[in-house]
Image (cartoon, helix red, strand yellow):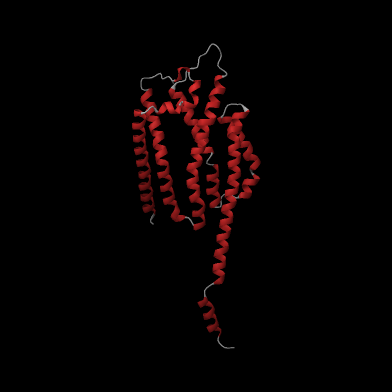
Amino acid sequence: MHPLEHLEELRRRIFWVLGALVVGSVIGFVLITRFDVLALLLRPIQHLLNGGKLKYLSPADPFMVALRLAIAAGVVVALPVALYHLWAFISPILVPSERRAILPAIYLSAFLFFAGAALAYFGVLPITLRFFTTFEPGSLEQNLTVDKFLSYLMKLILGFGLAFETPVVMLALGAVGIVTSEMLVKGRRFAIVIIFVLGAALTPPDVFSQMLMAVPLLLLYEVSIWLVRWTERRRDADLEEEGEGEGRGTPGDDAEGEDREGPA
């Protein structure tokens, strides 16, 4: 394809993703305005709220909250569409071994992101809020506002969701030969330090919360090493098959060689 045709295809696929985002956001806004979706989000921390409800300070806050939740719902709806169009756009330039490695990574990325988001919402969020409320002095009263809570919640979910994408990133880099399993093994000590620093930055400064994030990330790092080794073995097997195919040649070539030699 001509470079302009590639750009036209990219533009068309981006429009599909944006369309899915708009449709998902509209559906999410309708559902949020008709049903009390925010109450479902507050269930893990219901016992930590005074009166069981979040406060708001501006008359526009309820609408803005519904809009932000609707956009988040649109992102969830658009994610599978975006992954499909990403694969459809890049697959023609990949060799078969790279396709076999990257296609499972695309499906795995969605699962890992939602797994990280679920851990952040159901596990880390209640622990962090309970930890922070223990430092409430007698002269202060907890009064969580909806905008601050949603900002904190989105950062926590996004941080855990992106952190859980480590195996997918390593699998893709290993498939194209940028990262090797030997490189990951040698860098394991540095990765452990980085993971614990990340856990300390995204969770309260207590050992349990840090371990709650660091342990899954350490396991995912080991899974990344295994996945990269798997892609290396598949790539080596494909190269061996190609070499054997070239070495065998065709029967016609042998016959032609005998004819050219002629009688002794």
Q: Residue at x 36, y 53 (%)?
A: 5
- Which residue is painted at 58% across and 42% down in the image? 220
Observer-nearest residue: 217 or 123?
Answer: 123
Q: How far across and how far down the image is residue 130, in percent? A: 55, 23
Residue located 33% across and 32% down the image: 30
Q: Quadrant of residue 192?
A: top right
Give the percent coordinates (x, y) of residue 217: 58, 38
Residue at point 54% right, 64% down?
A: 242
**Does residue 144 appear to the left or right of 74 in the view shown?**
right
Q: Nearer the viewer, residue 262 or 202?
A: 202
In this rendering, the count of numbered labels is: 0
**Residue 116 vs residue 92, the one in the foreground:** 116
The reply, left or right, for residue 56 in relation to residue 178 is left
Q: Position of residue 235 (x, y in %)?
A: 56, 57
Q: In the image, is residue 122 above or below residue 233?
A: above
Q: Taking 16 as reference, is 147 above or below it? A: above
Q: Nearer the viewer, residue 35 or 4?
A: 35
Residue that sits furthest to the bottom in the current view: 264
Quadrant that contains the C terminus: bottom right
| Above or below: residue 91 compared with residue 115 | below
Counting from the top left corner in percent of width and height, residue 236 is at 58, 58
Query: Where 47 falls versus 29 (above or below)?
Result: above
Quadrant (top left, top right, bottom left, bottom right) of the N terminus = bottom left
